[in-house]
Image (spheres, rainbow, N blue to C red):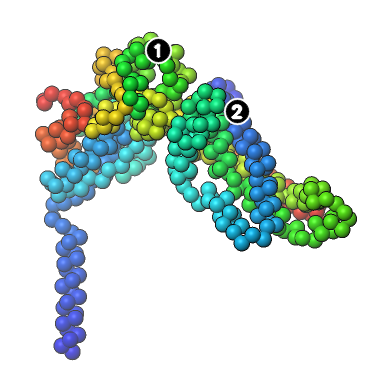
Amino acid sequence: MLMETRVRWGVAGAVMVVCAALAGPAAAGETNVAVAANFTEAAKEIATLFSAETEHQAVLSFGSTGQLYTQITQDAPFEVFLAADDDRPAKAIAEGYGVEGSSFTYAIGKLVLWSSEADLVKDQETLKAGDFQKIAVANPETAPYGTAAVEAMKALGVYDALKNKIVQGNNIAQTYQFVETANAELGFVAKAQLAGNESGSRWEVPGDLYNPIKQDAVLLKKGEANDAARAFVAFLRSPAALAVIEKYGYGVESAN
Amino acid sequence: MSIVQALSPEIWTAVRLTIELAALTTAILLVVGTPVAWWLARSRAWWKEAVAAIVALPLVLPPTVLGFYLLVTLGPSGPGGALAGLWGARTLAFTFEGLVIGSVVYSLPFVVQPIRNAFEAMGDRPLEVAATLRASPARAFWTVAVPLARPGFLTGAVLGFAHTVGEFGVVLMIGGNVPGETKVLSVAIYDFVETLRWREANILAGGMVVFAFAVILAMTLIEKRMRRAGE
């Protein structure tokens, strides 16, 4: 009898401990964030800082901006959208998926022409000489870095000559992978993807050759009532997050 | 506006490319798959089921696994790159030829399995009779085994063709979305959906549904008829 009671209390105690562990601190919540592929590494680092600072968790989903936007229009459970452009966040608000007035530029992307071979990429002359078979570009229809790459090639007057050598990555991550595996000798990637990678050869495309890649964030209607979602959007503008964003080679808008 | 007018040349290019890819893949698979199926049906080697399992792998593996290995294999540091070097290219990825190789691997089980089943179903008897009538093994194969296995060949060819038309993940990973070279229908549909061009996406996707339905229905009916004719 005594034994039984003891066991019973023991079980009850264990259950309570487990419940407490699962519940965590009262304020902690979770938010689903859709992240453009180019921002993958920076977003992971920011999410880690975010959970350490606020005890909220950010669950990240990666994809091309176009793909994520399509999913958002189809009721995807995302609460925050970190796009690679400023069109789609604006569109999200206009079409009623985003919260009015919540969008802002969290990063300004930079375009780099990169090859995994040393000495292959020097500067714009590399593009003009066209001494290669395949050049990888993100799909200009869905990926802002692809749009910027096409703009840059047109500005240099090499687009028509290179058109038949272009292979398209479905997003900037796949474009990077085409170059990394050397299936394409070179390609236009995001500077952020090359953070901490000194391999190969590269040329940072001058900013006057393409429209600035303003990457906007927007709080989605689904996250409007979620503290964790609002906290994540606010955290993106904190000095800690800005430091990470700059570390990955993005520009940031001067503090407003 | 008719559907034909609604579809841009870009779409027709994708349709033609898809049909070319599927037809060529099916032809290659019939040539390569038949001896494999024959061996799997007739051999008594203890390790033949291991070979059969390898042939069946693409049924189970996610296309991303095939796509990843193909990307590396077809690339400059793999055998595909060496092969491409013969005509001065660096890689087989992003080319029609590369897609054919990928599709052959991807659709292999869909062709081999039905043909193997057909060879097994006919048993030893017809070949023994042919041998007593002094037919050479080659002659027995062509005049007895192949005609008897006709429903299997038909099923294999139709499934191989249809499955290649339906291929997406592998093409997305090794294709590079080059119009007229690797931008097949499934990828074109994906692009239309991503860019919110749902009218075009709807037309193509609807067309695929009709195509798939027609293929499956036709196959079942023809097979039924052949069975009856065979009895």
**Residue, disc 2:** B16
* Placement of the N terminus of chain A among the 4 image quadrants: bottom left
A188 left or right, relative to B4: left
Task: Name the residue nearer the viewer: A91 or B106.
Answer: B106
Q: Are marks 2 and 1 in contact (CB under 8 Å)?
A: no
Q: Residue at x 17, y 34 (%)?
A: A244
A119 left or right, relative to A161: left
In the picture shown, does residue B90 fall above or below B140? above
In the picture shown, does residue B211 fall above or below A201? below
Quadrant hosting residue A248? top left
B170 left or right, relative to A127: right
Task: Name the residue nearer the viewer: B2 or A39.
Answer: A39
Q: Residue at x 42, y 27 (%)?
A: A184
Residues flagged by tags 2 and 1 on a common chain: no
Quadrant hosting residue A40? top left
Q: Amino acid at mark 1?
A: Ala
Q: Residue A119 at x, y = what percent?
A: 33, 21
* Placement of the C terminus of chain A among the 4 image quadrants: top left
Q: Amino acid at mark 2?
A: Arg
Q: Residue at x 26, y 27 (%)?
A: A191
Task: Name the residue nearer the viewer: B136 or A139.
Answer: B136
**Residue, disc 1:** A129
Q: Secondary structure at mark 2?
A: helix
Q: Chain of mark 1?
A: A
